[in-house]
Structure formats: structure tokens, C-alpha cells
Amino acid sequence: MELEQFEYDNNIVRKFALATIIWGLVGMLVGLIAASELVWPELNVASWLNFGRIRPLHTNAVIFAFVGNGIFAGVYYSLQRLLKAPMYSKALSNINFWGWQAIIVAAAITLPLGITTSKEYAELEWPIDIAIALIWVAFGVNMMGTIIKRRVKHLYVAIWFYIATFVTVAVLHIVNSFELPLHFMKSYSWYAGVQDALVQWWYGHNAVAFFLTTPYLGLMYYFVPKAANRPVYSYRLSIIHFWALIFLYIWAGPHHLLYTALPDWAQSLGVVFSIMLIAPSWGGMLNGLLTLRGAWDRVRDSVVLKFMVVAITAYGMATFEGPMLSLKSVNVLSHFTDWTIAHVHVGGLGWNGMLTFGMLYWLFPKIYNVKLHSDRMANQHFWLATLGILVYVVPIYMAGFVQGLMWQKFTPEGTLVHGEFLETVTSLKFMYLMRVIGGTLYIIGAIMMTYNLLRTAAKGKLISNEKAEAPPLAALSHATHGGGKEYWHKIIERKPMMMLVLSLIVILVGGLVEIIPTMIVKSNVPTISAVKPYTPLELEGRDIYIREGCNNCHSQMVRPLRFETARYGEYSKAGEFVYDHPFLWGSKRTGPDLHREGVGNKQAKSDSWHYVHMEAPTDLSPGSIMPPYPFLLEDDLDTDYTVDKITVMRKLGVPYREGYEDQAMQDLEKQSLRIAQSIANDLSPDAGPDVIEALSKKEIISLIAYLQRLGSDIHEPEDPDGIISGLIETPTP
Amino acid sequence: MLKFIKHHMTSMENIEIYPIISLLIFFLFFTLLIIYTMRMDKGFIHMMEEQPLDDRITSKTDVS
């Protein structure tokens, strides 16, 4: 049989590997800053460095920059070798690389500036969303092109995971990013309230599944056998693992919304599928670990295997914990607490981080054709990273339990023991400090790896194009492997496009069954007639709430549980969010819930309280870890787009009456002046009209207006300015 | 307590068929998948397992 000569492109692998290291360090460092801000709030020195703005920068950097580049590095290396073919197009490889880096830079600039959609792990604004879609498609075309040009008959299981990743991430990203632009750097989610929440967590959950899990499982199925130099434990199990995982994962999103205003049937569906997920996840974990059966002695000598074993173990722990967290009884305690944070860091630091490190320690010597600079240093990195993970997650688990239990504690008389939310935060300070130490250890390890790998690269010489040979596919198609009869699955494995379409169908079933009913069945979101749209000033305030990332620390979702209603008031109802584009339920309470913050509610505070609190939270709440917002008191509100916002909201279905645009600015001024007057009455009763006029123009006024409106509609809002009643068409009797 | 939310369950027509259909689909799918994998040809499995380990690189020097 004649052999064809060809070359593997290692240059693109090197580029992505270097980007993985650089962005990994950046992402971890931003995480360390964010963690430090929770211990020493005085570190919130500037608006662009505030916790609310850099927390999304940390999550995006780690997910899309660190793990994203890790995926590309691993896929570009393994795909070529598994298919015995060079990448389909070097130009597409480079577009993929430079485009992805440009997107990361755009994220690193826009997020600290407060340009955000507020939807978790989908915070980037619409022009960047479009760029992501285009670059992702370039990657997909390049991958599918390579698969079509391959020199092997059947696709190895790792490649199925890559294909499912490509298809699903594309679907998730596009569906969740439907938004109506207001201007170049601002848009509003197409969906509102409950629907937006369901779509967002269908996305958010599956971003974890199909960005942090499936591609890395593909990498596991390639690099673990490579590093151990023996085949995977059970190829049969890997087939079941693949189909079961992608079939089940897509349904589980609603477990992020248990006890919320999401319809009960969707919550139950999410729970059932989450529990079922244990089976394929653990099947995969065992398959990875048992690959080392009879060869565990190699783990002692191979630092690469050490990293991989810890990674796979962390995967097993996180995928056992995930379904447990989706049990309603566990979720009552865990939700909104640091337990979630600990859970994701077992996944992030353990599974993704350690697998990436193992892969990089294996890759660099291979593509530079040289031994690793220092095995000793790599071993030290391994121990530092493992210790770092433990020092990080153990205290943060404790923080989650402690805070969750404190929230729930009642006196025998039936009042909350810790009625003051702040008490439940200040008691976590030591655990937050331990997290900073754990994170620091982990980063020191990563810096040692960077040094070690750069020295390795300097010692060797990059094999940009690695020569290889294999018989052409045409020659193979006549050869039979084993039995003569072909099973249906073998046929699928031979046909990559069919694989792509089948994966698509499998994931769409789960997505559509959940999303369509919520979208079309009106009874899923019963309207509450008292709930009215936001006033123009409140809309502006809401945008400032989004800009400052308040939703990263404050939820807007009072669950129907006694300890919640005792603290915050009436539980949140689906019909209260019908005009919320986007929804702002949040997922973590570093501060208290704000859904019943408005006038007439349990937590209601005066306008002047908010004014003073925003300037320096510790003045009113000693020990508070909330960042100060003095700039909101100094900067004037930009009202250039206020009128357009009304128009955009109407297009999205908010029933502002025809022609309300002409009235909007007048109403905005009227409401601003009233709030400014009320603040002045409390804080400086002698203030003249010009002082009040100047105060009324500040950003803080709009934020206060928004906070005072929150959750007040079910009590028939007070409407002191007579604005709310004029927002919509009142039916003539 | 959940009266408000439970209302959706009752208001959806034929909602009880949802979980039953889901269960059937999954049961069928996995049964078929497991039967298939158990009956898979050993030679084929061996060939697939070996795929990542077979490199056939002819030269470890840069050819560019």
C-alpha cells in the first residue's frame, strides 16, 4: 500500500499553548484580586477595578481565554494526529488564533469599563458576540474540513467530543445572545424575566458542559492514553459515555433556578436529568482512571500523569457534587452561597487547570523535541497546585455551609437569629482570607510552570512542521476491519457530517422541550396587572446597576421559603419580571437580596440612606465588604439615549404607550428632582434650588430610583410623581 | 406555599405525558446503545483503541 507524505502543523499548537499560559496567569491573577477585595474592601480603589466589574472579567478570562486556548491547543495537536492529516487550512487556523485573542482583548477592555450585558459567562456586548460566532465557525470549518480530508476510516471518540462541542457551543451562544442593540456598546436581551433566566441558565449550565467538559473529555481520551502509552480502558464505555453525556447534559440547566419563579415542571425536569448525569460522568471518570490499570507505578515517575490523575479525580468529585446540589433539599442550603463557588473551583482549578497543566508539560517537550527543563520543578508545581486547591476549596465550602445555616437560623420565638445580613458576611472573613492564600499557592505553581516551559522551549527548537506518513483513505475503504457486517454506529463514525447533525439533534431535543413551552404557553408566566414598566429614570438606574455588576453580589429573587420571606418579605413571582430585559436574578449573595428593596417593602430604606451608603458603605454598615461608589455621586447621568431606550423596550414588548418618548425626558427630570429634594431634606435642609438641581443630575439619583422601585409593584406602587400610571395605555372604561 | 407556581403544572394540557415520553425515549436509547456496544466487534474495538498511540511520524526534525 503506498504511503502518503504530509506534515503536521505544530506552529499553531505552540501559539495556542503560549496563549493558554499567558491568559491563564491573567485570569488567575484577576481572580486573586477579586478574592482579595472580599477580604480587604479598600482594594476597590477605582470603578474599573471594583469587584462587580472584575468578577466577570475573571470568569470570562478563565473560561474563554485560559480553557478556550487550552481547548484549541489540544484539539489542533490531537486532531491532526488522530486523523493523519494536517489542518484543513493554515489561514483558518490563524484566523482562529488571532480572532480569538482579539476577542479576549476586547473583553479585557470592555468588562472593566462596565460594558456588559450582565448575563453570566455571556457578558460581552453584541459586536463581540458576533465576532465570537464568526471565529467559532472558522474553527468549526477548519475542524470539519480536516475531518473530511482524513486518512483514517473511523473517527476516534475524542473527535466526537470535539464535534459535539463545536455544534453545541454554536447553538448555545447564538440562542442566548439574541439581543436588540441600543447603540454600538449596549443592547438588551430579547427575552424577559423568567424566559431570559431559563435561556441564560440553559446556556450557562451548558457552557460548563460543552466548553469546560466535553472538549476536555476529548483531550482526556487522547492525552491520557498518550501519556500512559496504553489504550483507553474501555472503548465501549467511551461510546456510552459520549451519547449519554450529551443527551442528558442539555436538560439539566434549570437546576440553577430551583425555588425561583421558574415553572415547577421545568425545575423538576432539571433535577431528574441532573441526577441521571452521574452515570455517564462517572463512567467517563472511571474510564480515564482505569486507563492506568496495572500501570499505576508510572504515575510515580510521570508528572504529566500526576496532573491528569488529579484532574480526572476532581472531575469525578465535581460531577458527583453537581447532581447533589441540584437536589432541592441540598439546594436550599447551597444556593446563593459560597458552596457554589467552591464547587466550580473544584472543576476549574482541579479538572480544567490540572488537565491543562498536564497537557502542556506533555506538549512542550514533544513539539520542541527536547526533554522538559526541570522535572523537579514540575513536581513542585504539582504539589503546590494540589495544596492550593485544597486550601482554596475547603474554607470556601465551610463558608458556604456557615452562611447558608446562618441565613436559616430562627429563634424559638420564630424570628431570625441573624436578622442583620452583614453578620453572616463578616463571619466568613477568615475563610475568605484562606481562599486568597490557596489561590496564591496555585498561581505560584502556574508561574513556575511558565518558567519551566519557556526554558524547555529555549533549549529545544520548534518542529514547526512535523513529517508523517499514512496510507490514503481510499486505500483503507476497501480494507475490512474485523467482521464483515457494519453496524450503524460504525457508519456514523465514518461520516463526520452525520455525526455533527446527530449531535445537533440530540442536544436540540432537550433544549427545545424546555424552552419552547416557557416561551409560548402564556400560563407559564401569569401577568400581574399591578406590575408596570420602569420609568425612564428607573431604566437609566437599572443600566447603572448592570454597568457596576451589582448582580454579581446581589440577587433579585426571594425564594418561597420561610427564612427568605422572614428576611426579605413576599417571595418573588414570575409575573413581576415580565418587563426585565435582561433578568437580574443573580446567582450569588455576597450582599443581601434586593428584590424587595423598594418602597413599601420590608427592607425599604430612605433615599438619603442609599445616597450615603453608596458613597461609603462602611459608614452605615461597619464591616461591610461592599465597594464604595463615590463616582456615582460625582458623575452626571448620560441621558442621550433615554428616549431611544423607551423605543427599544417597546420593540421588545414592553407596552409603553404610543408617543411616550415625547414625555420621557420631562418625567425623568420630575422624578430626579423629587429624589434629590428628599435627599437634601435629610442631609442638608438648607440646600438651595441650584444645589438640588445639580444633585438631581447625578447618576446616583437614577440608581436610587431603580432600587426604590424594586419589587414594590405587587403592593400597587406609590407613584408619588404620577409617572407610572402614565407609562402605558389605560383602557377606557 | 408553591400554589402560585404549581398552577402552571395543572394549566398545561396533557402535561403528565411529558415525563413518560422522556423516560421511554431514554430507556429505549440506552438499551439499544448498551446492546450495540456489547455486541461490538473486538477487532474493531482494538483498532479504535490503538488510534491515539499510532503516530507514524517519519521525521522529528523540522521540515519547513
Image: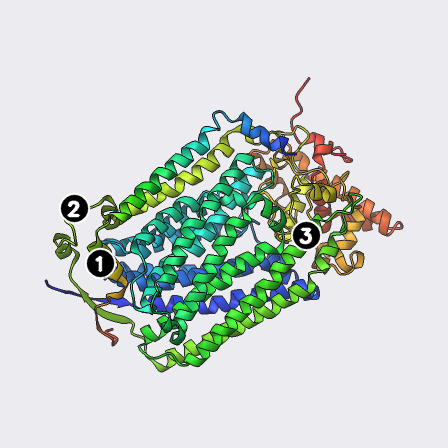
Q: Chain of mark 3?
A: A
Residue indicated by mark 2: A485
Instruction: Measure how far apart labels 3 and 1 are at the Cα level.
Output: 54 Å
Does the residue at mark 3 contact the one at mark 1 (Cβ under 8 Å)?
Answer: no
Classify A527 as above or below A375.
above
Residue A405: which numbered mark, if any? 3
Classify A451 as above or below A34.
below
Q: Examine the image and state in which quarter residue A466 appears.
A: bottom left
The number of callouts visible is 3
Does the residue at mark 1 contact the one at mark 2 (Cβ under 8 Å)?
Answer: no
Q: Position of residue A303 (x, y in %)?
A: 41, 74
Q: Chain of mark 1?
A: B
Q: Is residue A620 left or right of residue A162?
A: right
Q: Position of residue A550 (x, y in %)?
A: 65, 52
Residue A151 can be seen in this image: yes
Q: Position of residue A100 (x, y in %)?
A: 42, 59
Q: Position of residue A419 (x, y in %)?
A: 77, 49
Same chain for the residues under marks 3 and 1 in the image: no
Q: Where the C terminus of chain A falls, by quadrant? A: top right
Provide the secondary structure element on which disc 2 rests.
loop
Q: Earlier in the sequence, mark 2 or mark 3?
A: 3
Which residue is located at x 53 percent, y 49 percent? A324
Q: Examine the image and state in which quarter residue B8 appears.
A: top right
Instruction: Measure how far apart labels 2 and 3 are at the Cα level.
Output: 61 Å
Provide the secondary structure element on which disc 3 rests.
helix
Q: Amino acid at mark 3?
A: Leu
Which residue is located at x 67 percent, y 24 percent? A730
Q: Work out which residue is located at the far left of the displayed protein and give it.
A: A1
Residue indicated by mark 1: B47
